[in-house]
Image (cartoon, coloured by chain):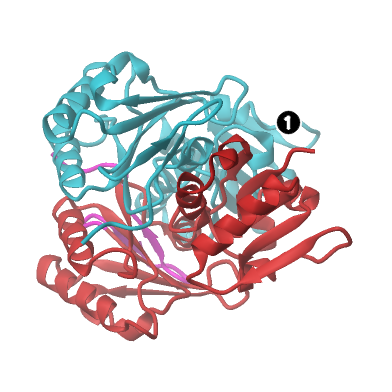
Chain colours: A red, B cyan
Amino acid sequence: MTGQVVIAGLGPGAGDMITPQVAQAVEQATDVVGYIPYVRRIAPRHGLTLHESDNRVELDRARHALEMALQGKRVVVVSSGDPGVFAMASAVFEALEAGPPEWLDLDIQVLPGITAMLAAAAAAGAPLGHDFCAINLSDNLKPWALIEKRLRLAVEGDFAMGFYNPRSKSRPEGFARVLDVMTETCEPERIILFARAVSTPEQVLRVVRLADARPEMADMRTVVLVGSSLTRLIERPGAPIVYTPRSAPV
Amino acid sequence: MTGQVVIAGLGPGAGDMITPQVAQAVEQATDVVGYIPYVRRIAPRHGLTLHESDNRVELDRARHALEMALQGKRVVVVSSGDPGVFAMASAVFEALEAGPPEWLDLDIQVLPGITAMLAAAAAAGAPLGHDFCAINLSDNLKPWALIEKRLRLAVEGDFAMGFYNPRSKSRPEGFARVLDVMTETCEPERIILFARAVSTPEQVLRVVRLADARPEMADMRTVVLVGSSLTRLIERPGAPIVYTPRSAPV
């Protein structure tokens, strides 16, 4: 039997946002590997081995998956959201490229999932309804100067923006600097959505103006969406709707 | 009975990429509205009325959906991909904001789907594995100058990029200009993925270097992904893998 590595996205949390394609891959797996909280979303069953690993060991986890596939296992590497968006797919390909040549013959597939930014956008309306950028605010793997450069260029281009990993306990100051840059470059009425634990029972959506945004509104379970200058708020009974119109004026 | 509008994403084409959440909304609908080819993806059944409409009548379609919901119908507005990414969600909210105040009391939900850019990325590897932008290249609703400005800023920020609606019969020249700007601002080895009809039986993926890219490689069924300067190609038996590493050097 030939082994296989499937890098699959479990979506942001809700079971009914997992695509049937991903659900089937998990059903057919012999082994599931991933970061602890994501593997815990997989129901145990006879014939399936669950391999939980800690955060920040993505390359070890990727090599483990490739090694097991070489032994004939059907391995599913699980990510939250979409595996190609600040998640495991790139880590597996980094390991593949640096690994032994026999890995190149393996059957490797990536199955997309609903990424947090788009689930958050849907929950609030359509804040990303025009051109947008996705920026990972973690400076674990890139210099802070590059994050700030991209942020300034995205503001200059009037893109809507989605920020992943905005604020962790080990680096709380980065997101405060992002808010400082935005305060300097955007109007104070700019609309910001803090979306925490989207699509789970703990989901909290908070819509504020830039002038009222505070660093503590974000943590690592939060995705932050920033509107363009054209993004609008529709007030109505219950939560307001945030959306960016399809048109931009000449 | 209170009516409802659900704006749902059918994903890029494959049936097994439709989330159970969206499938259930369609099962419970009394009316489905959308652009002809998307409505044709919905199986007819007793009690469900299908309303097909032409392209470029998004606001009419949105108003029709809101009117039917006000009459107590359970209406699903279908988009390909994700409804919040260059699709129907913003059109519905534009119509809502400009419409009669009683529409504001309606139950309106957006259900995300797998957007073409992320399905194409998964099919090719992980070209969007680092910060990226999504740009709609159609200048129907925004000036060409804004598209070109955003393109130049995204290149300057070394974002990976996803281009939607790259080239139509009525405006074939825009994408040629995009390639000209990229030729002027990027290295000739820059990796470009042309992904046509992703996840359907007609899927074609073509990976080329910028120097070899031609306008005719894209049409309206194509999403074009452009790597950052760090995006890499892994040659192997069968199709190559395209991926962007998670790290950027200092």
The N terminus of chain B lies in quadrant? bottom right
Return the residue at label 1: B43
Foreground of the two, B121 or B12: B121
Is residue A241 one of those drawn in magenta?
Answer: yes
Q: Is residue B134 left or right of residue B178?
A: right
Which picture quadrant has residue A126?
bottom left
Q: Which residues are magenta?
A: A228-250
Identify the residue at image location x=45%, y=54%.
A85
Residue A41: image quadrant is bottom right
| For residue B59, side relative to residue A173 (left or right) | right
Assign a secondary structure to mark 1.
loop
Q: Nearer the viewer, residue B200 or A85?
A: A85
Location of residue B26 in the rendering, given as x and y in whole percent from the top left corner: 69, 44
Tell me where residue B162 sits by quadrant: top left
- Residue A116 makes an appearance in the image: yes
Residue shown at 16% from the left, 60% from the top: A149
Residue B207, compared with residue B132, is above or below; it is above
Asked if residue B129 lies in the magenta stretch, the reply is no
A127 is higher (above) or lower (below) than A196? above
Please identify the quadrant where the C terminus of chain B is shown. bottom left
At 10% across and 71% down in the image, what residue appears?
A184
Q: For this rendering, which residue is in front, B203 or B206? A: B206
Q: Main secondary structure of the magenta part?
A: loop
**B60 or A246: nearer the viewer:** A246
Question: What crowding class fits label 1: few (fewer than 14 Cα within 10 Å), some (14-19), or many (20 or more)?
Answer: few
**Residue A100 image point, x, y percent:** 54, 45
Q: Residue furthest right?
A: A46
* Residue B95, x across and y down, in percent: 40, 46
Q: Is residue A183 left or right of residue A127?
A: left
